[in-house]
Image: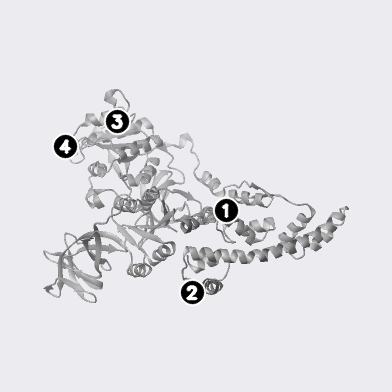
Amino acid sequence: MRIYELSKILNVSSKEIIKVARDEFEIQGLKSHMSSVSELQAAKLQKYYIKGKESEEKKEEVVKKEKNKKRNKPIQQRTEPKQKRPKRDLSKKTKGKKGDYKGKEDEEEVTEFEIGETISVKEISELFSVNTNEIIKKLMSYGVMATINEEIDFDTAVILAEEFDFTITKKEEENQFDKMVEELDFEDEKEDLKLRPPIITVMGHVDHGKTSLLDAIRDTHTADQEAGGITQHIGASVIEKDGRKMTFIDTPGHEAFTEMRSRGAQVTDIAILVVAADDGIMPQTEEAINHAKAAGVPIIVAINKIDKNNANPDRVKQELTEHALVPEEWGGDTICVEVSALKKIGIKELLEMILLVADIQEIKANPERNAVGVIIDAKLDKGRGPVSTVLIKKGTLHKGDFVLVGVAYGKIRTMVGHKGERIEEAGPSYPVEITGLSDVPEAGEILYVVEDEKLAKDLAAIKQDKIKADANKRKGKVSLEDLFDQIKDGEVKDLNIVIKADVRGSIEAVKQSLEKLSIEEVKVNVIHSGVGGITENDVMLASASNAIIIGFNVRPTNQAIELSKAEEVEIKTYRIIYNAIEDIEAAVTGMLEPEFEEVMLGRAVVRDIFKVPNAGTVAGIYVQQGSIKRNAQIRLLRDSVVVHEGEISSLKRFKDDVKEVNTGYEGGLGIHNYNDVKKGDVIEAFVIQEVKKK
């Protein structure tokens, strides 16, 4: 524990704590407020100060009782109501409301109070007229460590009140934010509703061909670009058939993205369940079925990969009946379409079935109102700032509208359609990328159009205050149980994790998956998560919290790498999410046996780009750190985000081929089958080495 943290808890200056640690406990090496002490030493220092203050508190209580006796005797003798002036004279020492309150207490002892969801330690000490240190000492006896300004929840306050013979009741607080949101998201009149394009979510098990199916439908090629061939972010696109439009959402199929898939089902009208004809129903297929059923949306089953020799569609249909999905040809009401995404078989029939189900559902919305939408995904772009993908649920969103999204707000500066075209407005069921928000919103947040920026800012502030209150409530319940249990027998252990990713949706998936890994002996705590590269601030937070840092599709800066070495903070980076989850799971269960590790060789910055005939693009590089070797693998970073991994096709110094380029030297580097290199990009060279088992 750091000295400054101990100083906040004990409400004592850092200098005094350092002096006591040296003189009383002979703890050496403490130089400043950033110095650290062990958990055992911290516990000894806390006990020292608590014991030292007990005698002072007893003296104060004795003096206080004597004063109360003198004060109460004349009050009991007065029976006439006119004799009230002396009471105000007795409370002259206090000012304002506090003095008035004490005067009332003298007249009639108040034993019942009304508070909100939370209350600070200072406020409750004033309410009970009890010394703050006494309150803190009681809280510590309950296993709650809180400073004078920290807040405790209502339940803890009730227990405290019983200790001091008081009664506390909860004050009903009107949620202003929810009330305003109800006014923004009102129900439309039936005569105002018009048919809108259906929103379709594609679900299923990993590698069953969801993205390939969408690929076949919209005639694009995105599957090859995705890491591991697995969809990492939610994408949305609009498809037109026979003059009618449909919006498709591609939710990731791996089980780690259950939360993202669940969010997709909440905004969808029709769910397409993709099942491989050669594989059948798998665990993620079952999850997809459950999410669609919970959302109350109709399910169309696309039996994919029927072109394979070992395909068995009938077995898939049989397995579907076990989940209450009986095909129409078997007398049920579940539409099943046999398709091949690779050979584009059955695609036309699938689209016809989607439109048929949409006609039966009569999907409608009012386009002539202020828009309400759902954030599908959000990220922080270096040039454009916060960028969010919104799916409009009702109304029409216009460029220049003032919007509120959780704690973020702003005026829409730009709107980009699913094909990358600039647009001025977007109606119901249309996905659009917007800029102009004050912050990166959480994926799944609701977007509301409001009258002006002031209202949006005020509502965002109310929402922020509510979040802070909830955070303070959790902060006030910090428990000493872990600390003292670890000192006694080391039974309880915490694995603190800092998560950084390129987009919000990935953070949610990683966070949910990691928190599920907690077992009885080890508790996994995600103490911080954010969008963007790994910075020095992340390393300092991890150092102070004894945490490890996980980066998903992002990399640390040079300064962060150096600081992590100095602070001995472990940084783990991944491109495919289930690799991260498997590593953490193995570490939690104590089964981690690393066989290979990545060894960083060097880091270079791209200073210029050259187009060479028959060779493609050559990057003019300057090596900042280590060396770039010809036989190494490379990683291309843009704004600390990984954009490509590959091999070196050529490495030159002037006109000569070389085996390596060292720190401080320039050279020319070509990347195998990749030309999208820009000035300012960073190239990392690394090798994968086998780790000898000890």
Q: What residue appears at the point 78 percent right and 60 percent down from the top-left corner?
A: 68
Would you call the spot at circle 4 few (<14 residues within 10 Å), some (14-19), or many (20 or more)?
Answer: few
Would you call the spot at circle 2 few (<14 residues within 10 Å), some (14-19), or many (20 or more)?
Answer: few
The answer, for residue 245, to whether it is visible in the render is no
Q: Earlier in the sequence, mark 4 or mark 1?
A: 1
Give the residue at mark 3: 320
Label 3 to label 1: alpha-carbon separation? 53 Å
Look at the numbered disc 2 and give the secondary structure of its residue: loop
Look at the numbered disc 4 and give the secondary structure of its residue: loop
Residue 340 drawn above or below residue 661? above
Give the residue at mark 4: 308
Would you call the spot at circle 1 few (<14 residues within 10 Å), some (14-19), or many (20 or more)?
Answer: some
Give the residue at mark 2: 32
Task: Please tell me which residue lies in front, 433 or 630.
Answer: 630
Looking at the rendered image, the quarter that the C terminus falls into is bottom left
Label 2 to label 3: alpha-carbon separation? 66 Å
Q: Earlier in the sequence, mark 1 or mark 2?
A: 2
Q: Earlier in the sequence, mark 2 or mark 3?
A: 2
Relative placement, left or right, of 19 versus 396 is: right
Task: Please tell me which residue lies in front, 335 or 693.
Answer: 693
Q: Give the percent coordinates (x, y) of residue 136.
A: 60, 59
Give the residue at mark 1: 142
Q: Give the percent coordinates (x, y) of residue 199.
A: 35, 40
Relative placement, left or right, of 546 versus 106 is: left
Tell me which amino acid carries mark 2. Ser
Tell me which amino acid carries mark 1. Tyr
Task: Please tell me which residue lies in front, 451 or 65.
Answer: 65
Q: Earlier in the sequence, mark 2 or mark 4?
A: 2
Residue 509 drawn above or below residue 298? below
Tell how many labels.
4
